[in-house]
Image: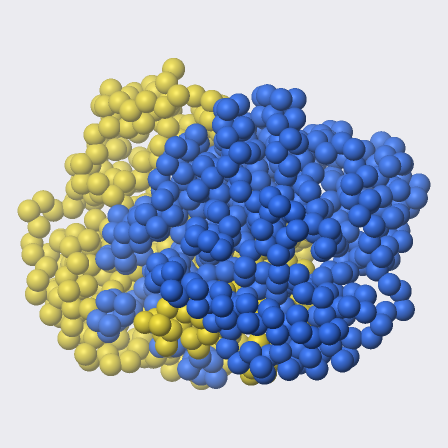
Chain colours: A yellow, B blue
Amino acid sequence: MNHKESNPISFHVPGHKNGNVFLNSAKSLFKDLLALDVTELNGLDDLHDPEEVIKEAQNLLASYYNAKKSYFLVNGTTVGNIAMLFATINTGELVLVQRNCHKSIINALTLIGATPIFITPQVDINTMTPTGLQHDDVIEALNTYSEAKALILTNPSYYGFAQDLTKIVESAHASQVPVLVDEAHGAHFGLGKPFPKSALQCNADIVVQSAHKTLPAMTMGSYLHINEKSLVDVEKVEYYLKIFQSSSPSYPIMASLDLARNYLQSLNENRINTIISSHSSFINKLKSLNKLKVISDCQESNYILDPLKVIIQASNKATGISLQKQLEKEGIFTELADSKNVLLILPLAEIKNQQEVISKISDALKGVKVPNREVRLNENFVFSRNRRVSKLAFSYKEMEKRKVVTMELAQSSGKIAAEVIIPYPPGIPVLMPGEVITSEKLTEIKNWKDSGVRIQGKSEFNNIKVFDD
Amino acid sequence: MNHKESNPISFHVPGHKNGNVFLNSAKSLFKDLLALDVTELNGLDDLHDPEEVIKEAQNLLASYYNAKKSYFLVNGTTVGNIAMLFATINTGELVLVQRNCHKSIINALTLIGATPIFITPQVDINTMTPTGLQHDDVIEALNTYSEAKALILTNPSYYGFAQDLTKIVESAHASQVPVLVDEAHGAHFGLGKPFPKSALQCNADIVVQSAHKTLPAMTMGSYLHINEKSLVDVEKVEYYLKIFQSSSPSYPIMASLDLARNYLQSLNENRINTIISSHSSFINKLKSLNKLKVISDCQESNYILDPLKVIIQASNKATGISLQKQLEKEGIFTELADSKNVLLILPLAEIKNQQEVISKISDALKGVKVPNREVRLNENFVFSRNRRVSKLAFSYKEMEKRKVVTMELAQSSGKIAAEVIIPYPPGIPVLMPGEVITSEKLTEIKNWKDSGVRIQGKSEFNNIKVFDD
């Protein structure tokens, strides 16, 4: 801001020269923020070697989250996940991974050539979406694979189910295994009740959060925190963050990350109560709509649903996808839809014009037709997996060398999958690349297909990519 | 824009909800652009699987640059360099690399575990900065290392020296070696004369450009182009772009990349002439300042200096760094300063208020003191290297395993360097990690030190990191 207000003359990058050079038709829209879109000038510090304002901002962030060190990320949680894995795991080493992790985790493990052991999460019955790992499953994995170099968790789930990770982290640490948490959807955790506990408060070693998802920050703005007693090598994390992020990081995104931290600090108990009461009032209005089933909490005692997440379903069994489409016709844009659910993310602020919004949702519901084919989810599908801890048939390095062919799903028993197969919901992979296609897995896929859910975003799913023998 | 103007209600990420939730003190500055900071909603397409507006915008980009395919990058040229290298080179494979490449190239080669063969560039005498590779050196490298999987070039140089790459590319293609070009500073090439030729017009296989550096695009916005007759695997490039970029790419950055392409198309011959004539007038005014040496072209016949770059030096032999500091006191911010030069990047538009700017520069010059210690560059330093094509003593994988120790530079003869040693100018590494510290290299470093240039940004440089035996 000081730089901007000094009316500087730019003979440097970026090419828009503080917003003065820009396509005329878009100039007024971009101009204000372009004055902040600067570069590593003297006095403006350097994200990759911070010593001044960026260091100060990151210190304020660490202090707010009680972290040893905190970092601004400008390439999303994607880059945080990649950097924390590269800093912790070497080629050929074994890691315990929550099965419904973000694709950036699998991508990083593949690049590293790590050996993943997958642990299947539990499922919330109302929504048929994943919650988190069962403590017993983690203990089994830690005992079976004592050579594991890390435990990689995803908490909360995309749909907002969160658990207190304290005991799981304790067990991992007792085995000298660091815990890395993708907390993409939980940057606002740590505000205290009624919000869930952050993985940082549960002593996880590294925690990555998408500030842009739930805080008022620009898209691609994320945080990476290293815990006070972390077992991991801080210098290695910094080394990989430098490698995988642009050498010209965006100042508007960085500024918005600092402002988002400030916003969080501005939320005192009073303000949080006001926000939560506004949300309650909105949720009650939603619940009064008679064509809608509203899920705003979790029935499993050890999970809570993030108060910023509301899941809705059409009472007439229409798919979430068709419900979402109707809402969009009324100008209501939601986060996510699957064969069953629509996910709403509420603001970390009061919800304004509630009556108007509810009336639009009510109008949308009128258009939701009873489906030709009902989605019938059977909770047994997801519990059919007797092996919740599983490993790959062969390594990522091995997969790189093999040829991939496409074949009929029904004929693929005994082959090794070369692609991930995910029904939505629950959004948990039935098959991962490198896993054996057993007859049990084929039955499970058939069950999902028969239930009417979408697999890989398609309503028909008959072929699968496998590795050639 | 259509989405924004429909007054949508957001129950999705990002958390600022179309700019409505934001720290009050910064709201007015960010609000306009936050309305464009959206996510992959229906109708807004998906950078990682483009089928609608983003596909259309990328097609317009490809069509403008005559490329087979063009991509918007939201993590800078850094991610383009990383992706093009991962798509082309496997572990242990040999690549020919211009010695003064960007650190992202070395980072990618290290991650891949490739075997680089470095080719030293030529140097411009006036500025003592690198220009480009000599055709003969490339031919020598291609003949000596016929198993090379790629030739990686940097053109233009950071200071703006550019050559026509046609013959070099021809030679590489004759040996079936694809050419990958980091054209970070040349996104505006291809506008035609008086601008240099783009590597795309010289038939390079992949070309990465920082749109944000010279075009009116937001920082972190870059382009990657694949040439019509490219030898490389397009699917592999796309695979790695997906992996190394955020799964939530920034819409404002993408929009600015589309607008920058539109801006380029709006520049007809008339408009370019007006811009160039405004630049000439500015450069002539600069030249009239008697304490300043102005370099606005190249004396070597096969190079031209990009018309958007002007290099200035203090006539009294003060360092570029001290000249830059004086300019900043007058509110003039420049791109880069080294022990000798200050680099100015001109706008791709008329330069306004020229008299005022020149008067500020003139005031700045009054403060530039005759230095205690003059920088005396000897052109023989850079030409002392009889071996312009060189390889590493051991591989990146080997380096990873070795311990690093710090020792006195003067005692390090015969050891293997574990860090890069770069004097500014010329900004060409004297030593790369993995290279033998010969007595010849030590003499060269001593010469640079005696000349008064900064090494690693420090005025004193006495220790070096080496690999333990």
The image quadrant that residue B31 belongs to is: bottom left
Q: Residue at x 9, y 45 (%)?
A: A373
Tell me residue A342's x, y (percent). Answer: 24, 58
Residue B455 appears in view? yes
* Image position of B197 (left or right of A448): right
Residue B314 x %, y %: 75, 68
Outermost residue toward the right in this view = B411
Point out residue A163 in the picture as x, y percentages from the top left corner: 45, 56
Give the image quarter of residue A309: bottom left
Q: Is residue B266 left or right of residue B290?
A: left
Answer above or below: position of A140 versus B450: above
Image: A224 above or below A285: above
Which residue corresponds to the image point at 50% horizontal and 71% vertical from the top-left?
Answer: B278
* Image vertical order of residue A334 relative to residue A238, above or below: below
Q: Residue at x 7, y 56 (%)?
A: A369
Task: Work out which residue is located at the far top of the displayed protein and give it.
Answer: A469
Residue toward you, B366 or B234: B366
- Any part of residue A117 in sight: no
Q: Picture quarter containing residue A143?
A: top right
The N terminus of chain A - image quarter: bottom right
- B188 and A251: which is toward the camera: B188
